[in-house]
Image (spheres, grey):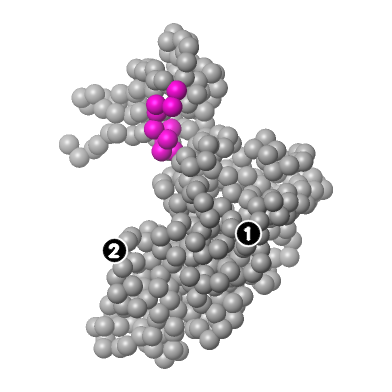
Amino acid sequence: MTAPYDDLETRDAKTRAAAQLAGLQEQMKRVENTPGSCLAGGQVDQLGDLPRLPVLRKSQLVDWQRDNPPFGGIPVQNITHIFQSPGPIYEPGGSSHDWWRFGRFLHACGIGAGDVVQNCFGYHLTPAGTMFENGARAVGAVVVPAGTGQTELQVQAAAAAGVTAYAGTPDYLKVILEKADAMGVTLNITKAAVSGGALFPQLRQYYADRGIACLQCYATADLGMIAYETSPTSGMIVDEGVILEICTPGTGDPVPAGEVGEVIVTTLNPDYPLIRFATGDLSAVMDGQSPCGRTNMRIKGWMGRADQTTKIKGMFVRPEQVAALVTALGADRARVIADRSGDADHLTVQLEGAGLDPDAAASAIKDILKLRGDVTFHAAGSLPRDGLVIEDRRTYDT
């Protein structure tokens, strides 16, 4: 494990919370002082007020940007790039020091001055390549802007430039190494910073067996760095430049500590304020402090998708509808299960809570989900705490 990047990573909880609140309040001022901003304002006197603000979803951002291009009326400043991601969604980018906050992660990987990083993230339209390059410059490393593809040329470049570190998706480094083996070329890569895909334990071990320390981070094109590893087995530490919540999918309601829920992030970047931005990913908060000495919250990493929208009997059912059903019935929680009965779809709604009325439940399901199905009732605390509000058990292989 490396030493902390700066003093921010070892702050006590009270100091960090005060700084986060001040940053959040500044973001709210920017939003409120921007004419025509689509982001909602609101009074935030303490961090506990944050869940009262609305959740911003990517679908809303697409609509806003279509009506008010390129950034949907969000107050943006000090940018040097405009990127496009699927949706399409347009993201601003800056060139100032560590604008996306990737320096923390690369430092945790042991990358710094004296390293040459082969950056195999894409540079075309999407921001990943520029994000990692910006972070590499922040820690003093030299960058080979390799992008993707042309593996033989990747090997030649890595050998000629004296590459010591790799940045890219978890699996592509293995492709490069195997090509180098086939070409009889020895590479000197000993560090890898990966994202954008699953880093399976056997793949991490493959790299370790070749003398390569591989760590992963969790980031998005909209938010930049969200969380990062400092060791393979101690979870991901939340970045100092964001406020992270774990909420019940389809709602803005935080789950109890340790439960699985949707990752919702507020960025404190003054150049591009996103407040309560829903990532659509599931994760959970880990107990305790990282053994590396960094004191911020830890999460378990990516645990699935929170956008569990599925079609049942020809009708889309969305997490927001399940949340509305819970509210309408006064239930503790609900779980919609899509299954098959013969060749037909079958719906079951599991409801958790006390004193629920079966007739009211059937009526609410029909009104809110626009479907009919079975209803089962469960005692408080008995439904799984796995982040699923819609579970699709159907198979299509027979």
The residues bearing labels 1 and 2 have C-alpha atoms spaced at a distance of: 30 Å
At mark 2, the secondary structure is helix
Indicate the position of residue 391 as horizontal and vertical percent values.
Answer: 36, 33
User: Badge 1: how crowded within 10 Å, few (<14), some, or many (20+)?
Assistant: many
Pick the quarter of the image with the C terminus.
top left
Give the farthest residue toward the bottom: 160
Query: In the visual, does 71 lie left or right of 358?
Result: right
Query: In the visual, does 376 lie left or right of 333?
Result: left
Magenta stretch in the rendered image:
380-389
- 90 is higher (above) or lower (below) than 245: below
The quadrant in which residue 253 appears is top right
Front-most of 395 and 199? 199
At mark 1, the secondary structure is loop
Name the residue: 59% across, 77% down: 139
| Amino acid, disc 2 | Gln
Indicate the position of residue 147 as horizontal and vertical percent values.
Answer: 45, 74
Front-most of 267 and 236? 236
Check residue 382 for magenta coloring.
yes
Residue under numbered circle 1: 240
Indicate the position of residue 266 as horizontal and vertical percent values.
Answer: 64, 49
In the rendered image, is residue 127 in sight? no
Indicate the position of residue 188 as horizontal and vertical percent values.
Answer: 38, 85
- 3 is higher (above) or lower (below) than 377: below
| Amino acid, disc 1 | Glu
Check residue 261 for magenta coloring.
no
Residue 202, numbered circle = 2
User: Badge 2: how crowded within 10 Å, few (<14), some, or many (20+)?
Assistant: few
Front-most of 1 and 351? 1
Q: Earlier in the sequence, mark 1 or mark 2?
A: 2
